[in-house]
Amino acid sequence: MLRVFPYFLQAAWVTLQLSVLSCLLGLICGALGAAARLSRSPVLRLVGATYVSVIRGTPALIQIFILYFGGPQIGIQLEAFEAGMLALGFNIGAYMTETMRGAIISVDRGQNEAARTLGLSRFETFRAVTLPQAMRLMIRPLGVNINALIKGTALVAAVSVVELTYTAQRYIGSTYKPFEMFFLAGAIYMTIIYVTGHGVSWLDRRAALK
C-alpha cells in the first residue's frame, strides 16, 4: 500500500479535478434548470421538467456511455475525461435543479408580497428578499449533492479515466490484493468527502449568522 500510495495520490488529483469541474457545470445547469422550472413560460417549464425527468430517470453510467461511445456517431468526439465531466455535470445538475427550486419556493410568500407592496419589482424582490434566504436554505442540500457527485466520479473508471477507482483496479492486477487496493481508494474518497463536508458545514454556520 505504501509503494502504490503516490500513484493513488495522482489519481486523487484527477478525481478532484473531475469533481470540481463537474460541480461547476452542475451548479450552472441547476441554476438554469431552476429558473426554467419557475418560469412563467410554459415552454421553459416543460424544458426544465423534461431535463430533470430524463436525467434523473436514467443511470449516470448510461449517460457517460452515450457521450463517450455514442458521441462520435453524431460528430461529437470527446476524450474520456471530458465525456465523464460533462455527463456527471449534467447529471448532478438535474438534482441541483430540484434542490434550488425547493429552496426558492420554500421562502415565505408573505415576504415577497410585502416587498412588492413597498414598490420593488419582481426581479428586485427576488434579488433582495427571496434569493438571500433561498441560498441559506440550499447550502446543506447542495452539500449532499456534491458528496454524491464525488462518489459518482468512480463511474468514469468504466471509460478508463485514471482516477481512484480505475487506479485501484489497475493495481489489483499487479499486486493481487483487491482488499488493500480498494480500501486505500475508499479511504481517500472518505478523506475528500470529510473535508468537503466540513467546508459545507462552515458555509452553513456563516450563513446562519447573517
Image (spheres, rainbow, N blue to C red):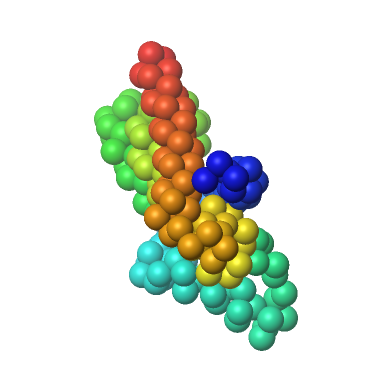
Viewer-proximal residue among 190 and 126 = 190
The answer to whether residue 168 is left or right of residue 80 is left
Q: Is residue 185 above or below residue 192?
A: below
Q: Quadrant of the C terminus?
A: top left
Q: Position of residue 150 (x, y in %)?
A: 47, 48
Q: Position of residue 136 (x, y in %)?
A: 39, 28
How many numbered discs, if any?
0
Viewer-proximal residue among 26 and 188 = 188
Residue at the image point whose x is 54% and y is 75% from the top: 65
Q: Does residue 89 show up? A: no
> Which of the 4 image quadrants contains residue 126?
top left
Residue at the image point whose x is 43% and y is 59% from the top: 178
Q: Does residue 202 show up? A: yes
Residue at the image point whose x is 36% and y is 34% from the top: 140
> Which of the 4 image quadrants contains residue 134?
top left
Q: Is residue 149 above or below residue 71?
A: above
The answer to whether residue 189 is left or right of residue 110 is right
Residue at the image point whose x is 46% and y is 27% from the top: 199
Viewer-proximal residue among 74 and 171 = 171
Q: Position of residue 145 (x, y in %)?
A: 40, 46
Q: Farthest residue in the top direction?
A: 209
Q: Farthest residue in the bottom direction?
A: 73
